[in-house]
Image (tube, rainbow, N blue to C red):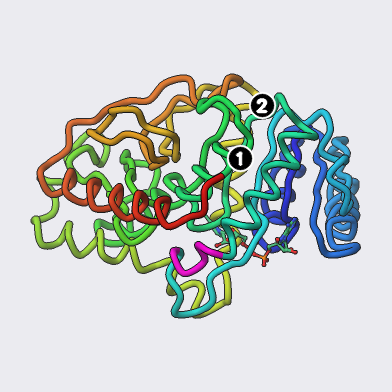
Amino acid sequence: MIGMVGAGRVGAQAALELASQGVDDIALVDIVDGLAEGEALDISHKISETGVDVSVAGSNDYATLRGSEVVIVSAGLARKPGMTRMDLLEKNSAIIASVSREVAKQAPGCILIMVTNPMDVMTYVALKTTGFRKERVVGMGGILDLSRFKFVLARRLQVSRSSISSVVIGEHGENMVPVASHTSIGGVPLTSLLSEGEISQAIEETKKVAADVIAKKGATVDAPGNAIARMAKSVVWNRREVLPASTMVEGQYGQRGICIGVPVKLGKGGVEEIYELKLSDKERQSFISGGETIRQAIESLPKF
Ligand code: NAI
């Protein structure tokens, strides 16, 4: 079973993706009376018509999470137009600390996937408050940033998105690192197709697109829902996909004691391996700046 805390826009969309693909039974929890139940019913009606037989339940009782193999957390405040993810730090860290304790109580064996922003810091808060092994707490951000980088590159190069192979690591925020030095188009290095200036423009555009969506429609919903579903499937089906996600680093990329986006192998055991890439000087600098931002945010939090 997949448990989900937060049946707001992103949680409900991820539930819809997972249920529509018949990945597993789903249990949704939200503090707003009736919301999770209503979403569960609506999704159930949709999949009944399409012939998928997984069950989708909703409640405001955390006990609904019992037996979950994966728990996805998207509870908390979302950015409003003009806000950065870090603006949510204080309020969301309190919410995530209390949600995580409930998750640890009800689903002590689960793999926890953090979505709430600022996601890297919230992944750290969940790790500390659940007391889970570091492999079992992982944050979603890199896949979403990667989907945006691919979109920007495909449009600029006029190629199919499926021909682009790339990765986005670092902070899920202002210092994200789309790794141009390891990006290829059908095997052809990106650096031989675009100039340094054009690559920098594409990276800046990638950083801004989420804020654009929020300014225009109020929230990012569809792309995050897809990215969450991909991570949950990799765990439930033990696919061992190698994808960018936030995890506790212990010396990798010269960082220690923070959660930050890196390429990981994601399977039944959660983060089964972290891979290190050789970065260009500029990429390494952005990664370090992101690490510093996350570290400062962690240091500003109350002790858990
Ligand atoms: P939303 O406001 O639509 O939904 C949040 C839900 O959390 C609400 O239904 C609210 O009732 C619920 N909630 C609040 N406190 C709770 C608690 N203690 N227990 C259970 N439920 C609780 O927000 P939306 O758009 O779904 O975004 C959710 C979070 O995900 C935000 O922090 C947003 O910034 C983040 N996000 C992260 C992304 C990523 O790439 N990591 C992508 C998109 C959003």
Query: Amino acid type of disc 2?
Result: Val
Query: Amino acid type of disc 1?
Result: Thr
The disc, 1 or 2, on the residue closer to the chain's N-terminal end is: 1
Q: Single out the residue that lies furthest toward the front.
A: 303
- What is the C-alpha distance between the residues marked 1 and 2? 24 Å
Query: Few, some or many C-alpha atoms within 10 Å of disc 2 (few <14, some 14-19, many ≥20)?
Result: many
Point 48% across, 57% down: residue: 118
Point 33% across, 60% down: residue: 152
Residue 184 occupies which quadrant of the picture? top left
- Relative height, residue 46 to residue 257 (above, below): below
Percent x, y of residue 205: 29, 66
Give the magenta range: 86-90
Indicate which quadrant contains ligand 1: bottom right
Point 18% across, 38% down: residue: 188
- Relative height, residue 171 to residue 126 (above, below): below
Which image quadrant: the N terminus?
Answer: top right
Point 71% across, 34% down: residue: 104
The residue tagged with tag 1: helix, strand or loop? helix
Q: Where does label 2 land, which residue? A: 236
Q: Describe residue 158's horizontal placement relative to residue 248 as left or right.
A: left
Q: Nearer the viewer, residue 126 or 40?
A: 126
Q: Where does label 1 land, which residue? A: 129
Q: Describe residue 189's horizontal placement relative to residue 71 as left or right.
A: left
